[in-house]
Image (cartoon, rainbow, N blue to C red):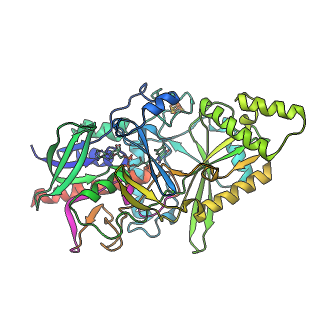
Amino acid sequence: MAIDVLVVGSGYGGSVVAARLAPHARVVLVERGRWWRPGDFPETVSDLCRAYRSARNPRGLWSVQLGRGTGVGLASAVGGSSPINYGITSRPDDHAFATWPVSAAELAPWFERARAVLRPEPDPLADELGDRRFLDLVEPGRRVDLENTIDWRRCTRCGRCVPGCNVGAKRALDETYLELALRAGAELRAETEVRALVRRGDDGYAVEVRPTGGGAPEWLHARTVVLAAGTLGTLDLLRHAEVPVGPRFGQDISLNGDALAFLHDVPYPLSGHSGAPISTSVRIPFVGDDGHTRTLMVMSGRVPRTAMRFAAAALGVLGALRRFPTAGDAWRRRLHDLRTVDEGGALSRTFMYKLDGEDSARGVARFTARGAVVDWPDYADDPILHFADQRLRAWAEAVGGTVVPNVARLPGMRSFSVHPLGGCRMGATFEDGVVDDVGRVFAPSGGVHPGLRIADGSIVPTSLGVPPSWTIAALAERIADDLVRERAKEETR
Ligand SMILES: Cc1cc2nc3c(=O)[nH]c(=O)nc-3n(C[C@H](O)[C@H](O)[C@H](O)COP(=O)(O)OP(=O)(O)OC[C@H]3O[C@@H](n4cnc5c(N)ncnc54)[C@H](O)[C@@H]3O)c2cc1C
Ligand code: SF4
């Protein structure tokens, strides 16, 4: 039987499209990653190394694509990046949509529709962590508490959301949209990689798939193909497809202002030692030289004990270099801090901050033998990251402690993002976008390529300044709705 809709990738874009189309059509969802269930996720550093995805380990869970000046972290799994993310479900400020071909008001109902399925909840114990009080102290009136796709009643606060919940408390896509898709009859082909896409005149597309890591190739035929392979995955597929696309292809890539910061040894009981998912933040407005308001989001986070020990060593050395203690007692305390994460040590007064912000989306895709990478040599100098530096230094000046405002600036480190967006941006025409506002791919002739859509992070035209999963799901809801209506029209013809 012919496939009506073939969806490539099972992340926030692909799962939504599969769930909404499956009641109306024969849907096949192709995902190169494997199922990862509670109990399968890496626990130790050696597990983490074993789970790295590479040519020798094609079924691995995570990987990094290094470009000039950037590294991008990716997941490859049923559910896309959802099994290994923090589940933060956050909506961008309205100004983030100012230059989009679809307005914040038009998108609002699709955000609500996605929220009803994702079911994020606020952390009932967040007040006990001390994060909120500290953020209120340094940024009064700017706190925005978060909601996560986590079942808090089951969460043990082990802090291991990245790289995956072995407790079964994380509500990843396999418990939400994917479950809906499968219940409605979508066929999931996991551990299957899409290799090529060829247009067959007016008769849809031929799609070459093969088992992840090798095996016999197979050609599938689908009337409609939805690319949802994640920002870099979709760029790779479209680059090799025999489909001419607009001049903005591979341009305007945002890293969403992603950065990591630490505030070490401040005179406030901030973190305690237990890990906990990121559950609170501040949103700080920043007006750039161009007069546009952008958002910097500083999210208060924790890391598990093992990682905390690593941080203890690094931050302890950094703190010691900055403020040489003279008395023997101070040295003894410093050494104690290097060895332990006990209550009372500097690390119980140390915070990790995950930054997201509206960057200027100047990343460019480069295609290598290992797949697409993002080049943006001066990303760390983007105005939003300079603003973040100043702001965090001001916090440290006000309260004391040692600040590392951007880990990427430390010797030997580089900028790193888990939120790459864009490269196939939505636009109004072939010249200024790769797709239109419902994910249809512009053709040079002036129309669109029939039967081909994109529904993932790659279509997001600007930086969002907040974690992107909810926005991607909302966009995919809107695209899926348009596809359902398109099919209904075709059937009545
Ligand atoms: C560690 C980490 C933490 C994060 N934390 C958060 C958070 O708390 N909140 C938030 O909102 N966002 C978070 N993000 C970002 C968020 O998860 C991503 O923005 C989102 O998952 C992107 O959705 P997507 O549908 O575009 O692609 P993805 O979720 O990346 O899904 C794409 C899927 O396509 C598959 N694929 C790729 N190529 C092929 C191919 N050729 N054939 C078949 N399958 C293919 C991939 O294996 C992958 O599973 C985090 C990301 C990471 C990595
Ligand atoms: S902190 Fe909670 S949701 Fe995160 S991995 Fe631990 S148990 Fe799971």
- Total labels drawn: 0
Quadrant (top left, top right, bottom left, bottom right) of the N terminus: top left
Report the side of 165 relative to 285 (left or right): left
Quadrant (top left, top right, bottom left, bottom right) of the C terminus: bottom left
Answer above or below: position of 262 versus 110: above
Residue 122 rendering spot, x and y as whole percentages: 55, 40
Q: Is residue 491 rendered magenta in the image?
A: no
Answer above or below: position of 249 versus 135: below
Residue 456 rendering spot, x and y as whole percentages: 35, 53
Report the side of 46 relative to 221 (left or right): right
**Residue lying farthest to the top in this orientation:** 39
The residue at the point 38 percent across, 40 percent down is: 54
| Magenta-tinted stretch | 445-464
Q: Is residue 140 visible?
A: no
- Depth check: 145 or 293 in front? 293
Report the side of 278 relative to 59 (left or right): right
Q: Is residue 339 visible?
A: yes
Report the side of 236 relative to 346 (left or right): left
- Depth check: 310 or 35 in front? 310
Q: Quadrant of residue 279?
A: top right
Residue 439 rendering spot, x and y as whole percentages: 30, 60
The residue at the point 32 percent across, 34 percent down is: 34
Residue 90 rendering spot, x and y as whole percentages: 50, 50
- Depth check: 414 or 281 in front? 414
